[in-house]
Amino acid sequence: MTNQLHAPLVWFTGLSGAGKTTIARAVAGQLESRRIPVEILDGDEIRSFISPDLGFSRADRDLQVRRLGYIAHLLTRNGVTALVSAISPYRDSRAEALQASKQGLEVFVHAPLEVLRARDTKALYAKAARGELQGLTGVNDPYETPEHPALMLDTSEMALTECVDRVLELLRSKGELGERIA
């Protein structure tokens, strides 16, 4: 088990609508019920409050990931488990952010594009299809799939409870949070 400080960082990455934030919130609920300090850093919320100056160029996306990584590092070094939910499309910026924490775990949240288009909770895929939105990650802007994630969750095939159980098992298997999530 890790010492009291240096809690884990779980970085949920994947396309819009894959389920990153939904899973992060459910995991946070499980950790909170066990009195484990946890914070969710949602990419959309951080962009609204801390990064409204950023657009969606590669440089801006990388800077957004660095900001999220730094905030996560501050939390984890102070014993708070950080759950980051952000598309974070580029491998190198994700790797940099994960390396800033002593125990960074990348979780790839995936669903096929046709499933994401059907979900389209933010109407982004519909706007992109009509030509009203350029730069949508995974459609007309790149997304670099994780090469070796600690965990891959296919939300088109897995229920939310199974996804949460897998994340908790990952934390247990890495010795994070110890018997508190047994």
Image: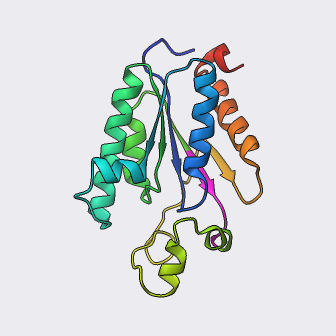
Residue 97 pos. (x, y %) = 38, 42
Report the quarter where the C terminus lies: top right
Q: How many marks?
A: 0
The front one of 175 and 128 is 128
Pick whichever, 65 or 33, lies toward us: 33
Whether residue 56 is in magenta: the answer is no
Q: Is residue 127 above or below residue 111?
A: below
- Residue located 66% across and 62% down the image: 111
- 26 and 181: which one is in front? 26
Relative to 180, is 166 above or below?
Answer: below
Report x, y in % for residue 103: 48, 29
Q: What's the magenta region?
A: 107-113
**In the visual, does 91 lie left or right of 105?**
left
Work out which residue is located at the far bottom of the displayed protein and give it.
130
Locate the N terminus and report the quarter of the image it occupies: top right
The residue that appears at 31% across and 37% down in the rendered structure is: 70
Can the viewer see residue 119?
A: yes
- Quick check: can you spot residue 174? no
> On the image, which quarter does residue 135 sit in?
bottom left
Residue 156 image point, x, y percent: 73, 60
Residue at 41% over, 54% down = 44
**Spot occupied by residue 141 in the image (x, y as percentages of width and height):** 43, 73
- Residue farthest left in this picture: 53
| Colour style of the rendered protein structure | rainbow
Residue located 39% across and 49% down the image = 45
Q: Is residue 78 left or right of residue 156?
A: left
Residue 112 highlighted magenta (yes or no): yes
Image quadrant in which you'd find residue 175: top right
